[in-house]
Amino acid sequence: MKSMIVKTLALLAVAGSLSACESMSTSQRNTATGAVVGGVAGNLIGGDTGSTLGGAALGGVIGSQVR
């Protein structure tokens, strides 16, 4: 349970820091945020490196398509 709380707080910290990047376009911010969220979700679901990388890749693709 403690591990999940730490991961959630890390996700919120990264998402907050990404939202402060004013020089990035909206598409770039969405891609980066999607990759972070997807990577964390993949790690939580699969628990291994492959799941993390797959989640990050899928999240980045989905994030780049959000307008």
Image (tube, rainbow, N blue to C red):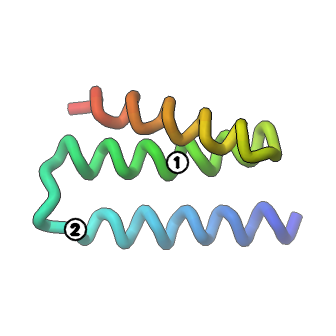
| Marking on residue 5 | none
**CA distance for labels 2 and 1:** 17 Å
Q: Quadrant of residue 8?
A: bottom right
> Residue 47's spot in the image, x, y percent?
82, 46
Q: Residue at x 46, y 67 (%)?
A: 14
Q: Quadrant of residue 9?
A: bottom right
In this figure, which residue is indicated by the disc labeled 2? 21
- What is the quadrant of the C terminus in the image? top left
- Amino acid marked by disc 2: Cys
Question: What secondary structure is found at the residue carrying circle 2?
Answer: loop
Q: Residue at x 63, y 50 (%)?
A: 40
> Residue 1's spot in the image, x, y percent?
88, 63
- Amino acid marked by disc 1: Val
* Residue 27 left/right relative to 19: left
| Marking on residue 37 | 1
Q: Quadrant of residue 4?
A: bottom right
Question: What secondary structure is found at the residue carrying circle 1?
Answer: helix
* Residue 24 left/right relative to 46: left
Q: Residue at x 50, y 35 (%)?
A: 57
Q: Residue at x 13, y 51 (%)?
A: 25
> Residue 59's spot in the image, x, y percent?
47, 36
Foreground of the two, 35 or 53 = 53
Mark 2 crowd level (few <14, some 14–19, many ≥20, 10 Å Cα): few
* Residue 20 left/right relative to 6: left
